[in-house]
Image: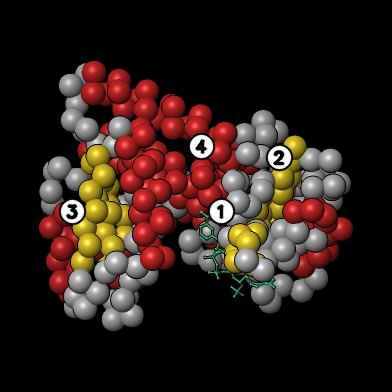
Amino acid sequence: MSIILDGKILAAQLKEDLSKEIASLKGQHHPTPRIMSIAFGQSAASQSYITSQQKTAQSVGIHYALQVLDEKLPQQEAINFIQKVNSSPDVHGIIVNKPIPASIDFYTLINAIAPGKDIEGMNLANLGALLMNKSHLWPCTPAAALALLKSCGLSLQGKHAVIIGRSEIVGKPMALLLLKEDMTVTLCHSKTVDLEDHLRGADVVVAALGKPLFVKGDWIKEGAVVIDVGINQHEGKIVGDVDFDSAKDKASYISPVPGGVGPVTAVILMKNALEAFKQSL
Ligand SMILES: NC(=O)c1ccc[n+]([C@@H]2O[C@H](COP(=O)([O-])OP(=O)(O)OC[C@H]3O[C@@H](n4cnc5c(N)ncnc54)[C@H](OP(=O)(O)O)[C@@H]3O)[C@@H](O)[C@H]2O)c1
């Protein structure tokens, strides 16, 4: 039987640490960290994410402003807007919410953000810096998965991690973060042969493939740590990429969905905002 890695508890601890640090900076007469969140039109998909960002920012003492841009705004004008925010000393971090209009290329927009304000850690400069072990702003989801993994308190050095999924936003940066921890990393994807055999040798499994309940308990080594990044709609419920019910009998620690990586991700965004603010001082 495994120990559940409760993301809400870790998120609350991280928020408390952030609140204290921000209050202490204010006590030293520094201004309030300020972030700007950009959305295109009013979309239900982005609204719940925006509300959660807003609440998390407020709870730690970060000023949050939302700018809704016209869905029909040409790409160059959206870039011009971001460049204006880049040059504003009153904004320390920028978020671009999905969905973005089909007429705008997501990575072109993300790369228009000044690297020091890219608190989602997704532009080329920050991903390149991560590759060189020099980044201060890590992509939020893999950083949250790592924080949850580290909360087990186990030694990671030399252990074998198997990641399923090689996206730019989760799998690839996750591999770099685990390499930084001196783990031996196997990065699997849809063309991987004998995925189950890779998983059976893993001390740590990070599932980020976007397939509901895909990873079964009997693919998991007894005592492995399982971090489930997946968020999927399945039979009217939100579930992860791991079949939690069978995996919990094999894993030593396992993160649930919902309530695992998700709540931590929202706080890592604010941790990045504070980091960007401190770098700007
Ligand atoms: N918790 C959070 O805060 C958070 C944030 C972002 C995403 N997510 C969730 O994390 C999951 C992954 O997101 P993503 O954006 O990385 O997804 P993505 O861009 O769709 O990438 C999925 C990856 O999984 C691989 N894959 C798909 N089917 C596979 C299979 N049968 N066997 C092995 N590998 C397979 C794909 O391989 P190929 O490269 O070969 O196609 C791809 O690399 C989704 O459920 C998403 O909702 C959670």
Q: Earlier in the sequence, mark 3 or mark 1?
A: 3
The relative height of residue 167 versus residue 91 in the rendered view (above or below) is: below
Which residue is denoted by mark 1 in the rendering? 174
Q: How many marks?
A: 4
- Asked whether the viewer can see residue 83, the reply is yes
Q: Quadrant of the N terminus?
A: top right
- The answer to whether mark 1 is within 8 Å of ligand 1 is no
Quarter of the figure with the C terminus: top left
The residue tagged with tag 4: helix, strand or loop? helix
Answer with the quadrant where ligand 1 appears in the image: bottom right
Instruction: Find numbered disc 2 in the image and state the secondary structure of the residue it sits on.
Output: strand
The answer to which quarter of the image holds residue 122 is: bottom left
Q: CA distance from mark 2 to mark 4?
A: 14 Å
Residue at 44% x, 43% y is 268
Near mark 4 (Cα within 10 A), the count class, few <14, some 14-19 or many ≥20, is many
Q: Residues within 10 Å of mark 2 (few under 14, many from 20)?
A: some
Q: In the rendered structure, which disc, 2 or 4, sits on the residue that comes first in sequence?
A: 2
Instruction: Name, please, the residue furthest toward the front.
Output: 236
Q: Quadrant of residue 236?
A: bottom right
For marks 2 and 3, give the CA distance: 41 Å
